[in-house]
Amino acid sequence: MEVNHLERFKQELVIAGYSERTIKMYCMYVSALLALVKKDPAQMDRGDLVGFLAKKKEKGASNATLALVHAALKFFFKKYLKNPIVDDIQTPKKAKYLPTVLTKDEVRGLLHAAKKGRNRLLLQFIYSTGVRVSEAVNMQNESINFKERIGKVKSGKGSKDRIIILSKNWSVLAKKYVEKKKVKTPWLFSKKNGKKLSSDTVQRIVRKAAKKAGIEKDVTPHSLRHSYATHLLEAGENIRNIQELLGHSNLNTTQIYTHVSTEQLKKVNSPLDNL
């Protein structure tokens, strides 16, 4: 019964256009619920779900994780089983942390520390375009126009395509990298056997480069995306252009970078200096 529900649930997520990573996480949480409660989902009540969420919290799950578990259960019960049981179950609000942003010197150090060739080009690509790690590993050669220096992110988050601008210097080096590949593959960045990279592999590449560069911040591929947006804002780029380049459907999501940018704040004189 459990396997049947999980397989159908996964199919619903695929049809709904969720990313591979989200599908994996949602299925993992629903599987954990079914293993714990040991009831047919149609027989579960509110107490079963609250108890499951409470156990997650007791084991140290963050508010952000609880929100993700809640979202998984909501899709499973409301969309898949047509049962609104999750609607009145509240989870704590996610803590609002400012994203990790690297200075330009730190970005230079990180890129230099990455292994020359594919790894360095990959990190340069993420920083220079602001793409998500899932969008980077799914990028295909046919979506890149080196001559015009533009690319297309196909069906990113929210299932909408968008245009990205490519760095002039990066385009020259990346074109040579693609042409020199011994194994022909549709993927812009690939393993030696031509298969595409996983998001976990990119995470490891970033962590290794950050450690080698001596960066003590908690650096992830998403840190490069945050740094891209922040550095554009600090350079005076229009926030609506940044919104479009990042693929944010809501300007409020992009507004976080107005709180992160420090260059304008550093121009403010302390009142103590004017006494």
Image (cartoon, rainbow, N blue to C red):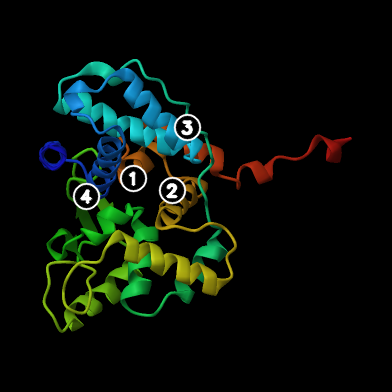
Amino acid type of the residue tagged 4 in the rendering:
Glu
N-terminal-most mark, 4 or 2: 4
Q: Tell me the distance, in whole angstroms, between the alpha carbons under discs 3 and 2.
A: 22 Å
Is residue 32 rendered to the left or right of residue 10?
right
| Residue 210 percent across, percent down from the top left | 51, 67
**Quadrant that contains the N terminus:** top left
Q: Which residue is mark 4?
A: 20
Q: Tell me the distance, in whole angstroms, between the alpha carbons under discs 4 and 3.
A: 23 Å
Instruction: Please tell me whether mark 1 or mark 3 is closer to you in this view.
Output: 3
**Residue depicted at 29% across the width and 35% down the height:** 33
Q: Which residue is mark 2?
A: 229
Q: Which residue is mark 3?
A: 94
Secondary structure beneath label 3: loop
Q: Is residue 254 visible?
A: no
N-terminal-most mark, 4 or 3: 4
N-terminal-most mark, 3 or 2: 3
Amino acid type of the residue tagged 1 in the rendering:
Leu
| Residue 219 percent across, percent down from the top left | 49, 58
**Residue depicted at 21% across the width and 49% down the height:** 20
Q: Tell me the distance, in whole angstroms, between the alpha carbons under discs 4 and 2.
A: 25 Å
Amino acid type of the residue tagged 3 in the rendering:
Lys
Mark 1–mark 2 CB contact (< 8 Å): yes
Instruction: Please tell me whether mark 3 or mark 2 is closer to you in this view.
Output: 3
Q: Which residue is mark 1?
A: 246
Amino acid type of the residue tagged 2 in the rendering:
Ala
N-terminal-most mark, 1 or 2: 2
Secondary structure beneath label 2: helix
